[in-house]
Amino acid sequence: MSAPRVLLLLPTNTYKAHDFLEAAARLGVETVVGSERPQALEGIAPGRTVTLTLSDAGAAAREIAQFARRHPLAAVVPTDDQTALVAAHASALLGLPHNPPGAALAARRKDVLRERLRAAGVRTPRHRLVPAVPSPDDAALETLAREQDYPCVLKPMFLSASRGVIRADTAAEFAAAFRRIEALLRLPDVAERAGIGPDDRAEPGGIRPHDTADPRTAILVEEFAPGVEVALEGLLAGGRLKVLAIFDKPDALDGPFFEETIYVTPSRLPDAVQESVVAAAERGAAALGLVEGPVHAELRLDERGPWLIEMAARSIGGLCGRVLRFGAGITLEDLILMHALGRGVEAYERERQPAGVMMMPVPRAGVLREVRGVAAAREVPGIVDITISATIGKSLVPWPEGSSYPGFIFARADTPAAVEAALREAHGRIELVVD
C-alpha cells in the first residue's frame, strides 16, 4: 500500500517547515510542499513541490485541485493564518474534511472575528473600522481621535504575531499609531500577506455583501482589554475541541506594543478560571463555524472573566510548538498530521512535566553582528534547547513593524515557576550584538 500523500502549505517565511517535514517522515507520510515561490526540487522531482498563488486563497485552491488530479491528496495542511484560508477552500473542492471557508476567513479577518463573536454573545472588545485609503488628512484624523474612547488598540485586520498592534492612551498617541500602521500597510510584504481574494468577498457566511472594507487598507480600532493573558492550543474534530495546552504569559502585555515573550504550561491559574478559558474558546470556535484542525486562541482575564482576543485556525506560531510533547516522542505536528489523515488523537495527552518557551525579544533595530553567551545559557538548569533563528548580517526589526524573533529558548522543570526562572536566567546570559 502506498503512503498517503499530504500537501503541506509552507510559505517561504515560515518557521515550521522542518518540524512538519520531520513529523511526516516519522509517520510514513509522503509530503508535497506548497509555497508561493518555486522550490529547487520542482524541476527535479515533479509532484513533490507545487507553486501556489497564496495571496489569493480561491486561486490557490484551484491550483491545488488541478495538481491533485495528477497527484491525489489525502489532506491539505495549513501552517499559518494565510494558508488556513487556502486549505479550507482547497479541501472543500477536494471533498476532504475541512473548516468552511467562511469560518477560516472569519478567523483571519479581525473585524469579522469580532462581529461573529459579539453576535454569539462571546465577550470580545468593541471595535470599528477606519479606512486608511484614501488617507485621512490631519484634521480628519484629529476628529477621529477626539471621538475615540481610551485606552484603545489599533491594528491591521489580517497580520499575526502582534505585528502592527499599538495601544493608544491619548488622541496624540492615536494619530501617531494610525500613521505608523498606514506606513506598515504600504510595505510590499504586508500587502502580500492579506491573502484575501474576490472569492472570499462572495463567500456565503463569510464577509457580508455590503462589507466593502479592503483588509489591506483599513485599520481596526478596538477597546483595550485589561487583564492577564493566556493562550490555548487545541484540535477540533467534528466541532469538538480537544485542549492540548493552556499557556500562561507571565510578562504583562499592556503595550504600547505587544511583542510576545514567555509561554509556560501547565497554567498556574485556578481550575475554575482555566475551565472558563476552555468554555470561551469552545464558544468562540462555534461562533466562527470552525470544526476541523488546529486552533490557537489568545484570551485576557479580568475580574469579569475571559475576553476572547484571537481565535486562529492554525497551530501556535514560530517554533513554540516544540515545547509540547504527547508521550513517546509525539509532537504537536505529529498530532496535526494524524488528525488530518483521520487517525484518532483523542487518547494523546500532553506530558505532565512543566515546560515553556521564550521568544527572544529584538533589543533594537539594526544589523545582527554576533550572538554571545549561548553556551553559558545552555548550562542553566532546566534549559533543554536554544535555537537562534536570526541570521548574522541580517537586519533585526523591533515590533510593531517587526514579526521575526531572533531566537527561541526552551525549558523543562519540576514546576512552572522553575521553568519561567530558567528561561529568564538563560535569556539574561545571551547578548545580541546589533549595529
Image (spheres, rainbow, N blue to C red):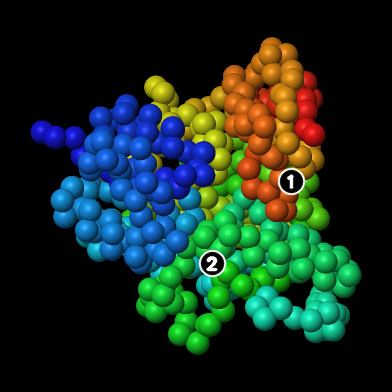
Quadrant assignment, res 57: bottom left
* Side (left or right) of 344 relative to 351: left
Kind of residue indicated by mark 2: Arg
The answer to whether 250 appears left or right of 332 in the picture is right
Q: How many marks?
A: 2
Which residue is depicted at the point 87% across and 73% down? 171
The residue positioned 60% from the left and 66% from the top of the image is 157
Q: Quick one: 156 or 364, which is closer to the camera?
A: 364
> Where residue 191 sits in the image (x, y, percent)?
56, 63
Furthest toward the front, the residue is 43
Q: Residue at x 57, y 56 (%)?
A: 189
The kind of residue tagged 1 is Pro
Q: Secondary structure at mark 1?
A: loop
On residue 418, the disc is none
Which residue occupies the extreme bottom position in the image?
Answer: 210
Q: Which residue is mark 1?
A: 398
Q: In which quadrant of the rendered view does residue 200 lie?
A: bottom left
Rendering coords of residue 264 (x, y %): 64, 35
Q: Kindly give the residue lying farthest to the left in the view shown.
A: 1
Q: Position of residue 246 (x, y in %)?
A: 58, 42
Residue underneath mark 2: 109
In depth, the one of 25 and 102 nearer the eye is: 25
Task: List x then y, in percent, for residue 270.
Answer: 67, 43
How far is the residue under mark 1 from the one under mark 2?
24 Å
